[in-house]
Amino acid sequence: MHIPDNYLSPSTCAVMSAAMVPVWVVSVKKVKKGITKTNIPILGIGAAFSFLLMMLNIPLPGGTTGHAVGGTLLAILSGPYAACISVSIALLIQALLFGDGGILAFGANCFNMAFILPFLGYFIYKFIKDRIPTEKGELFGILIGSYVGLNMAALSTAIIFGIQPILFKNPEGIPLYSPYPLSVSIPAMTIPHLLVAGVVEALFTAAIFSFIKKVSPGMIYQGREQKTKAVYALIVLLICLTPLGLLATGTAWGEWGVDEIKDVISGGNQPLGFTPQGMENGFTFNSILPDYTLSGLPDIAAYILSAVAGTSIFLILFKVIAAFKKETFDKNSKLPSE
């Protein structure tokens, strides 16, 4: 679901970024108003969880790959507004440091994974939990909310891809950017997510939530003192597991490089046969650790190094923010959920 640069027109990128601005503004205001100094590092933990889950690629039907995001998990732990901030920062670091997702497409990626996923997933979870006030109801809400949230984010991504060849063509009618129409992009994105990725998202969300509820229940949207040692241990375990993402050898749908897209077979039995002009002559950005690799290091070592670097950035960043925040709220105040 990480849309690379040049798959979307500049105007599409501008519109999607503009759409996210009020979401970010409201989210920052809500979190700033309701979060305590003690709880700010939880946002870093949430960003780390999302980042690590997105590194764990899994093979999907059709020879592509996908990943969990953890958006609903973060929304349940700290509220959808806080989840929006955490996932947005995770996506920003991925784009800047690792070239995972485009710089210009950052707004579009945030719209799908930091807005649609956590907000929709959370409100479905809350709707079910409020009507079935039992542990089974809570678990059911987690599974359905996270599954639907991820799949709706995938559908939104597919629609954004699919409208490009409709809106942006050269005089000969050849697409300038993403060449795949809605008839190709929607089934290519949604079917694998419905069958596999959504299930993985739901299982990860339920498992991590259950673990945190057991070892540190104060982290779950309550603003109480948190016991984070076991949670940090889980983060270390996820870092160690990230090289499993290397086993999924395919490329995520819609993330092919400019040098390979003309040879990709998608939506038919023939390769595309051309490179869209807007992609060939588009924006380029050289990240520090492209695709979580580093020249001279084995892939496994580079993957772990990337995981450690990204996680450290999130944890340190939010601890620094917490250090500068004045404690003006009662420690039992809650993060805003509505």
Image (cartoon, helix red, strand yellow):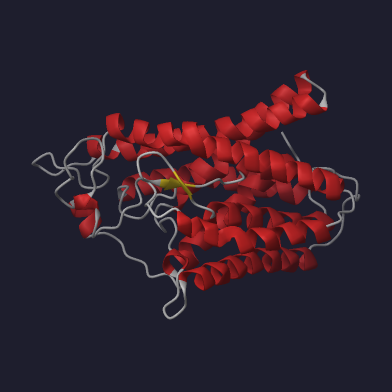
Q: Which residue lies most toward the top here?
A: 131
Q: Is residue 222 left or right of residue 255?
A: right
Q: Quadrant of the N terminus?
A: top left
Q: Which residue lies most toward the left here?
A: 172
Instruction: Answer with the quarter of the image where residue 157 lies.
Output: top left
- Foreground: 284 or 323? 284
The residue lying at 28 percent from left, 40 percent from top is: 164
In this rendering, the answer to whether 4 lies above or below 270 is below
- Foreground: 59 or 272? 59
- Foreground: 14 or 311? 311
Q: Is residue 89 visible?
A: no
Where is residue 203? Give x, y as percent. 64, 39
Where is residue 14? Give x, y as percent. 39, 48
Where is residue 246? Give x, y as percent. 47, 59
Q: Quadrant of the C terminus?
A: top right
Where is residue 45? Give x, y as percent. 71, 57
The residue lying at 65 percent from left, 69 percent from top is: 312
The residue lying at 20 percent from left, 47 percent from top is: 176
Q: Is residue 259 left or right of residue 207?
A: left
Number of labels in the image equals 0
Q: Is residue 171 visible?
A: yes
In this rendering, the answer to whether 218 lies above or below 198 is below
Q: Which residue lies most toward the bottom here?
A: 296
Q: Is residue 7 left or right of residue 297?
A: left
The residue lying at 71 percent from left, 23 percent from top is: 128
